[in-house]
Amino acid sequence: MIEIDAVLDEGGLLRSCGVRGHARAGARGNDIVCAAVSVLARTALRALSGKEGVVVRGGAPERGVFRMETEAAGEGKSFLASAGAFLIEGFKLVSEEYPGYCTLHIHTERRN
C-alpha cells in the first residue's frame, strides 16, 4: 500500500508531501500505481526546484520513500499554489481509482 501524506497551510499552499510504501498492483517495474505516484511526485519536485521564489527540499532517498518540503515568496507563491493543486489532484485521482493500493491523507497546518 502506498500512503501519501500532504500538508497544506491555511491558505491551501503545499507545505510538505510524504510518500511511503509500494502498491504491489503489478510486478516490480510494471506497477501502474507506483509509476503514477512516482511520476507525479518527481515531476512536482523538479518543476518547483527550478522556479524563482520557491524553495524546495527533498527527494527519494530509497525505493518506496519520497519527501518534499516547500516554501515560497512573492510570485513563487502563485506557482506553488498551481503546482501543489495539480499534485494533490493527481494523487486524489490515483487514490480514488486504486483505493486498495493507494491512500491520500491531507492535513492543514494551523498557525498560532
Image: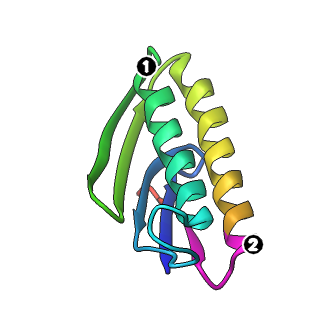
Amino acid type of the residue that numbered disc 2 sits on in the rendered structure: Glu
The residue positioned farthest toward the left in the image shown: 61
Question: Which is nearer the eye, 82 or 45?
Answer: 45
> What residue span does the magenta drawing correspond to?
95-107
Q: Position of residue 18 (x, y in %)?
A: 41, 60
Amino acid type at circle 1 is Gly
- Do the residues under discs 2 and 1 have CB atoms within 8 angstroms? no
Q: Residue at x 50, y 60 (%)?
A: 6
Tell which residue pokes out farthest to the bottom in this image: 100
- Determine the residue positioned at 60% across, 55% down: 36
Left or right: 2 in relation to 96: left
Which residue position holds label 1? Answer: 50
The disc at residue 96 is 2
Of labels 2 and 1, earlier in sequence is 1
Examine the rendering and report whether any part of residue 107 can be seen.
Answer: no
Q: Give the structural element (helix, strand or loop) at label 1.
A: loop
Is 64 situated left or right of 51 in this image? left
Any part of residue 79 in sight: yes
Magenta stretch: residue 29 in it?
Answer: no
Q: Is residue 57 left or right of residue 90?
A: left
Pinpoint residue 23: horizontal percent, then vertical percent: 51, 75
Q: Residues within 10 Å of mark 2 (few under 14, many from 20)?
A: some
| Disc marking residue 112 | none
Q: Residue at x 44, y 30 (%)?
A: 46
